[in-house]
Amino acid sequence: MLRVWERPVSDFLSGPLGLVPFAPLADVDVSELKSVIASMSARIDGQTDRPLGARLWAASYLLMGLQYDESLINNLLTGASQMEESVTYQALVKKGLQQGLQQGLQQGEAHEARRLLLMLGQEKFGQPTPAVGAAITAISDTTRLETLARRIIHVSTWDDLLKPN
């Protein structure tokens, strides 16, 4: 079994080109990573065409995520523009954007449902107590908020509204 983190970085920087993305995971101190990335760049950018270089940089980015935090990786790989051309990198970006959009839509729906619930409740019951306001603010499930909004016509107080069915 090969334990990358136990191998000297030179094994990956001077070995077969396909092993270069593993270099940052080798037995290397964080303070040496900038130099390692520069050596990787010399090999990848100097010995590959753009599509292969993009794949190697994307692999490096993904592998580094196993050991280093995002801000360090982004700082070190700034300038590895070929990585952004990688279909793998593009797929990850697209997936992240889709997930972010979906999460944003869900949060927006919950926010609007809470706003309407509070507005309808204030109209019927008056201003909610801080505890009631906090309880409603804590609800993120849109279906639950919609159920509460429908219950408003059947109950006579904020407390009755928030009681389990």
Image (spheres, grey):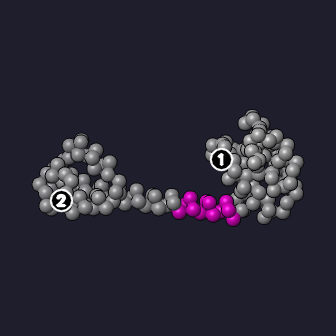
Q: Position of residue 12 (x, y in %)?
A: 82, 47
Q: Is 100 a magenta residue? A: no
Residue depicted at x 28% and y 50% = 136
Q: Is 93 a magenta residue? A: yes
Instruction: Say which element carries label 1.
Output: loop
Mark 2 surroundings within 10 Å by alpha-carbon count, few (fewer than 14), some (14 through 19), many (20 or more): some
Q: Say above or below: 77 vs 91.
A: above
| Magenta stretch: helix, strand or loop mostly | helix
Residue depicted at x 31% and y 48% = 137
* Residue corresponding to mark 1: 66
Residue kind at label 1, given as amino acid type:
Leu
Mark 1 vs 2, N-terminal side: 1
* Residue corresponding to mark 2: 152
User: Going by the image, does 111 lie left or right of 14?
Assistant: left
38 or 65, which lies in front? 65
Residue kind at label 2, given as amino acid type:
Ile
Residue depicted at x 29% and y 55% = 115
Res 129 seen here: yes
User: Going by the image, does 9 lie left or right of 87?
Assistant: right
Which stretch did the figure color magenta?
Answer: 87-98
- Please tell me whether mark 1 or mark 2 is closer to you in this view: 1
Res 122 seen here: no
Q: Position of residue 18 (x, y in %)?
A: 81, 56
Q: Distance of mark 1 from mark 2, alpha carbons?
A: 50 Å
Q: Position of residue 8 (x, y in %)?
A: 82, 40
Mark 1 surroundings within 10 Å by alpha-carbon count, few (fewer than 14), some (14 through 19), many (20 or more): few
Quadrant of the drawing holding the C terminus: bottom left
